[in-house]
Image (tube, rainbow, N blue to C red):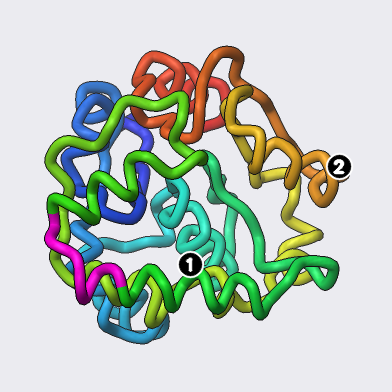
Amino acid sequence: MGKPKILCLHGFLGKSSDFDFLSSEYDIFAPELSRYIDQSLEQMVSSLSKERDLSQYHILGYSFGARLGLQIYSRMNGSNKLICLAGRFELEPQEDLCFREKFELSLLEKLKTMSKEDFLSFWNHLPLFAYDEHLMHPNFVAAAYYFKNYGLSKQPPLKEKLWERRGDIHFYYGEKDEKYCQYAQRYLSDWSVSVLPNIGHRILQHPKEVIKICKERL
């Protein structure tokens, strides 16, 4: 019996090497999303499927990659598992869509007008990452498409669609990631949610915890 297969999806400004620490124990497919992010979701899934048989893979997604993982998972049938690290579903009806759209537009404008160094400093100093180590070598290729094509304001409704499969979907949040922990408390009470002590939003910066999660869930 071979190693479990995992499709690993990195976050905004992330890269495939973010998951290298898993390669000794798992058969990982960690695509550079900058190669696909300018495509529609259907085109992206088609492109990824040409490289690997996705039906054989569990999914591990971090932040943006978790939201993308939910979309890909909704198109898969079978016994696959999905692990969402610091991820979420679409905006809830109670949340402010206009505010989110304006925020994403402001990020697009900053990507256009700021130097990479200045944008990275801005990004690293967002309150969301207050308890994380700074990103040092981000991948800026096709960065704008993360918001143009796949911003949270554009996330399709999947929560109801995936309800019957919720036993195979697991959400993990860092204890110090107050924003996402509050989201989970309000909107994911009937889903599998775990909180990791003394960790912020960037869960991939804690490889031992991620390996432990994969061993427990896959």
Q: Residues within 10 Å of mark 2 (few under 14, many from 20)?
A: few
| Amino acid, disc 1 | Ile
Q: Is residue 50 visible?
A: no
Above or below for 103 versus 191: below
- The Cα–Cα distance between marks 1 and 2, rounded to whole angstroms, is 23 Å
Which stretch appears magenta? 110-116
Prevailing SS of the magenta stretch = helix
Horizontally, residue 31 falls left or right of residue 185, namely left
Horizontally, residue 93 falls left or right of residue 96, namely right
| Amino acid, disc 2 | Ser
**Mark 2, residue position:** 189
Determine the secondary structure under disc 2: loop
The residue positioned 60% from the left and 20% from the top of the image is 196
Q: Is residue 114 magenta?
A: yes
Horizontally, residue 135 falls left or right of residue 61, namely left
Determine the secondary structure under disc 1: helix
- The image quadrant that residue 210 belongs to is top left
Q: Earlier in the sequence, mark 1 or mark 2?
A: 1
The residue positioned 72% from the left and 34% from the top of the image is 193
| Image depth: mark 1 or mark 2 in front | 2
- The image quadrant that residue 116 belongs to is bottom left
The residue positioned 40% from the left and 50% from the top of the image is 57
**Mark 1, residue position:** 72
